[in-house]
Every structure is written in structure tokens, then in C-alpha cells.
Amino acid sequence: MKKRDIKRVARFLAASLTGFSLFCTPIVQGAESGQAQLAMAAPAEEDLLMFWEEKELYVQTATRSEKPIFQVAENMTVITAKDIEAMNAHSIDEVLERVPGLFVLFGTNEYLSSAQLIIQGSEPRHVTVLLDGMSVNSQSGGNGPTHFIPLRIVERIEIIRGAASSTWGSALGGIVNIITRRTGDNAMPNGMLSASYGEANSRDFAAELRGKNGPAGYYLYAGQTNSDGLVNSRDFSRSSIFGKLLLTPNRDLDITVSGGFSNPEQNNGAFPAMYVSGKGMLRDSFVNGAFEYRATPELTLRGGAHLNNYRFDQPVRFLLTYPPSPGQLRVQNIWDEQTLGANLIATWSSGFQTLTAGAEGSRADLDQTINVGPLSQSAGYPATVQVHSRMDKWGIFANDTLEFGPFAVTPGIRYDHDSITGGFVSPSLGTTWELGEHTVARASAARGFTSPSLGTIAGGGPYYAANSGLKAEYGWSYQAGIESGLADLINLKATLFRHETNNAIVRVPTTPPPLTTSINRGGATRQGYELEADTVPLYNLSLKLGHAYAHVKNDTVTSNYDNPYYDLYSWLVGVKYDDRRSLSALLTGRYIWWDFPPTMPAYPDPAYDTFIWDITATKKFRTGDSTTLDTFLTVHNIFSGNYTGSGLHPNPERWFEGGLRFKF
């Protein structure tokens, strides 16, 4: 971080904290009126109760059945809808970049840019992204996109850092489970209308409605997000709809049906160093059905089925400065994907144990179409190549949570099989130990894997050769940590991790150039730590800090631009003021050191040696007995920091936006 930025940040923090303290400190009368002892003051009892109640969550991602988070042995973080609203974020990736150990690499650094998710130094394809338990990872590349999911429909996000294959199958790096909002429970509908507007004609409009009619509860959402482009006319647009219906024929049976459609289009702008410009157009539609039947007080049956249709169109065209005609097609990749899946799970809870067992299966189809322009055709490449591939998967799993006083032990095992790479066994063992009311120690060991994507196996096009002999990447993950409340005022969390990956998939050149292919070669070791701290509100002020470090060692180097080993580390800072009545504000700072290798001479160098600071303030007005109006203002990148990974896409400098939320 540069010295001038450090000075700016110090002045800004000092001014902000001083201002908030003056605003929030009550006027004390009597002999002690001039002796405000902020450092020695104790938080109000309601602040303590609210703070620790928010830590006592029940989660479902660790074992696919609800359990208290203090019995979760995995390294888990939960982000709630309340946390998300305070951020005034527009995308799930913006929210995830504030989680220690989860490194988010944005594609174009733009408004609602797509991003790659990296957990503790993993590859993006190792991170499985779920939407209400349905995998949304791409069949072509294996990564999990989230920019098509409207942030407003999110009830909470449960994140597991580390291998989660004993529960979810292909998930060597971790899980990001996005859980959508609940349906309404009142006959009188309630909902929200929101609108925001910022520079470059950046706007976000949304409407939601929830209610209940007899045994049927519902939740409906519609929204539109657009921007003319904050940098280099990199525009973005997306229209989204989502709906959920909950039927309760009797008190023991719940049937849920949800579905949605989203069509993000992202103009990536010009790449002068490559003489091209690019665009990405996504169409995603899905239907997800589930049931829960409480057969007895001890036995619960759950199951469901889903269908996900995913189409991604990515044309790349030449710029005016290159010999072909401006706008002439260089290459166009079109991926049409369809995934159909189903599952059935049983949970037995009795006394000291909670046993969960289940089975699931899926069929994925990928149709890839590659169109090349006249320049490539003149070199002997066909004008169009079409490739179809299919993968069938099934898996069975079981896990148990056994309670022995303050101890909880969670053994788990799963067997997966797919029609291309064969079978894989994933055992795991975790334990938690409650050392006190707000102190718990955790440790886990798990074997995980990630199957190669269909696009990697099938290849296709003039630049990438198929390799049907690819096998799954696999390895062991070990983690240990402790979370503790210090004098009931600060919650501290520390985690150590080590991940060992074998059979790593790497891309290598082949003949004739520029053809490449993917092979299994060598492995990698990732190890490091995470540190987190958040304070109980004191005079309505609270502080969050996070730091993560990952050292990655690769056994295989495939080019002069690869590093045999590299370091990733991040710093996260959050200062929040919330009087829980009408005024709140959140100042956040984030920094990630990527340790990228030197780029090719034609590429601009990356820049990531500074913090990026944002601040958002919200004022609430009560407009009726059951209606409120929230007004908010956000300043992004307060100090206009230069922060970019590849150097091809400079990030926006300081920009402003404001908006309204009407809740009824």
C-alpha cells in the first residue's frame, strides 16, 4: 500500500470514527458529563444479546440437514440478508469478496462484472456453487458463475472453505450455497420496491412480493440492472425474474417449487494488446422442486428434482487497428448446456445423534458451437465446428453427527460415479469441542475431488484439442481452528489449513500451434491461515477485521509465465454504525495480493498494491404503520485506487450512486 494512501486512509478513518462518536455519544448530565469514557464503557445488554444470537445459526450445507453452527466441524461462514442489505452491493461476487479466505478475481472490474471464485488458493473449477442445493457450475469450463443470480432473492449464503466431497461430490475447493428467500406467511402481502442510480447511467430496479393464501405461500421477484459502462464503454444489462411457491397440504408435508430466468449481457470492451474486443451473453433458466416430509418426530424425508438450461454466447471481433476489417469475427464460442438432476435424503434425529443418508443423480449435456472468421478459415480451419458431449453422474452418501457432552463428532463418506472418469470415494471426519459458552474448537480431515468439465474433456474448435482420458483431480484437506468470544465483547476466529491436490489438470501446448489441450500432471499443495475479528456494538459502532494467507506450491510448470509457487493474501476492514432505528453507515476496505507472474510484453502489468475503500450510508423513514422508506448513498473506490488483476481491464475510479427502498 502506498504511503499517500495510508495517510489518506488514516485521516479518513480518524475523521469517520470521531464524527460517529460525536454523533452517537449521549449527552451525560451531572458531575460526570465531561468524562465520556468510551473505551471503558460496556455495551448495552440488548446489543450483547443481539450480537451473540446472530452467531447461533442453524445451517444446512455441512451435512445436508439442519444443525447448529457450533457443531459444524468444517470452516464455515454465513452471510445473511441483513448483512447484504447493509453493504448496498449489486452482485453476489461483491458480497463474497468480503469473506476472508475467499479470493474473488473480477473479469472486467466493471459494474456487475463476472468473476472467478478462489477458495484458499484453489482453482475456480474446484469451487462448487449451489442455488438452493442445485449446482450451477458451467459444464464447459467447470467454474461457478453467480452474476446471473439477482442478489435481492438471497436469504443467506453458506460457505464451506475446503473439500466438501463427502457431502456434495465434486467439490475439491469448497462450497458456496446460495439460499433463496422464504415465502410469505401472512394473508396480507408485503414486499419492496427499490431503485438506485449512479454514474454512467448505472441503475438497478427491483420489486418483490410475498404472502400466503390458504396453504400456499409465495415469493415473487422481478428486476432489471443496466450500466452504460464506467470505463471504456464496458456496458452491462440484465433482466431477471424469480418465483417460489410453498404448499403445505398438512403440518407434516412441505412442497416447494421455484424457478427463474436471467439474461446478463456484458460488453467486455476493447483489448488493444490483443487487437480484439469481446462480449459475453448468458441466458439461464431453471426449475427446482423439493419436498420435506416429517414422517415421525425422529425421521424426516427430503427430496427434489431440478432442470437448468444455460446458454453462453461469446463473440470476439477484431479492432480497427488490426489488418482485418473492423468488427470482423475472429472466433465465436457458443455453449448450450442442460442439466437434469434429482435427489432423495433421509435424516434420523434421536437423542445424541443426527444421521443423514441420501442418493442423487444427474445428466448433463453440452453442445458447443465454434464459428471462426475469415482469417482463421484462410489458415485452413473449418468455418464451424460442433461438438456434443454428455456425462451421467450418481452418488450415495451418509454422515452422522454424534454428541458427547461438549464434543460433537461428524464422520462422513460418499461414493460418486460418472460415465467418463469412473468412481471415487470421499471419506471425512470432523470434530467440535465447546470450550465455553462462546468458545468452540474445530478440526476436520476430508478427501475431496473435482471431476473434469465436459468442455475440457470434449474439446472442440480450432484452438483446443479434446482429451477423453482426463481423470478427476483429488486430494486431502486438513483444517483446525478456534472461535472464541473475548470478554463477551469481541468474537475471534483463527483457522489453519493444508490442502494436497494430486492428478492436477493443466493446459499444455500441442501440435500444431496454437493448439492446446488439458492433461493430468503433478499436483499442488496449498497451506495457510485465516484470522477474523468482529466486535459487539459499542455506542452503535462495531468493527470487523479479516486477514487470510495462502501459499501455493505447484509441482508442474507449463510455461515461462507460470510460478512454481506463489502467495495470496488479503486484508478486510469494516467499520459500521447502526442505531437500529433510522441511521446506519458502513465503511469497508479490501485488499488482495495476487502474486501474478510477469505478463507477456504486450500486456499491461497488473496493479494491486492498494486498498479499495467504499462507504454507504442509509437513512430510514417510517411512512406508515407498516411502511418504511430507506434512502441510501454509496461512494465506491473513495480514493480512486488503481486495482486490477490482468491490466487489460482498469477498474473504475471513484464513482457515486444513490437510491430508495420502499418496504410495505
Image: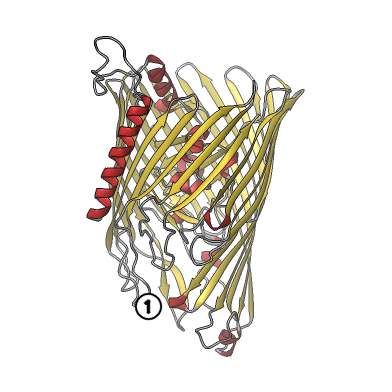
Q: Position of residue 161 (x, y in %)?
A: 40, 43
Q: Relative to residue 649, is residue 37 depicted above or below? A: above
Location of the N terminus (image quadrant):
bottom left
Q: Position of residue 479 (x, y in %)?
A: 32, 40
Is residue 533 visible to us here?
no
Residue type highlighted by circle 1: Ala
Task: Pick the residue in front: 142 or 409.
Answer: 142
Q: Residue at x 33, y 69 (%)?
A: 605
Tell which residue pokes out farthest to the right in this image.
214
Is residue 298 visible to us here?
yes
Q: Position of residue 506 (x, y in %)?
A: 40, 66
Location of the C terminus (image quadrant):
top right
Q: Relative to residue 136, is residue 343 depicted above or below? A: above
Which residue carries the number 1 mark? Answer: 602
| Position of residue 245 in the picture relative to residue 588 (left or right) | right
Q: Residue at x 44, y 25 (%)?
A: 579
Task: Pick the residue in front: 420 or 595.
Answer: 595
| Position of residue 182 in the picture relative to residue 656 (left or right) | right
Q: Position of residue 646 (x, y in %)?
A: 39, 65
Q: Residue at x 44, y 47 (%)?
A: 635
Q: Residue 238 sits in which quadrant?
A: bottom right
Q: Relative to residue 152, is residue 148 depicted above or below? A: below
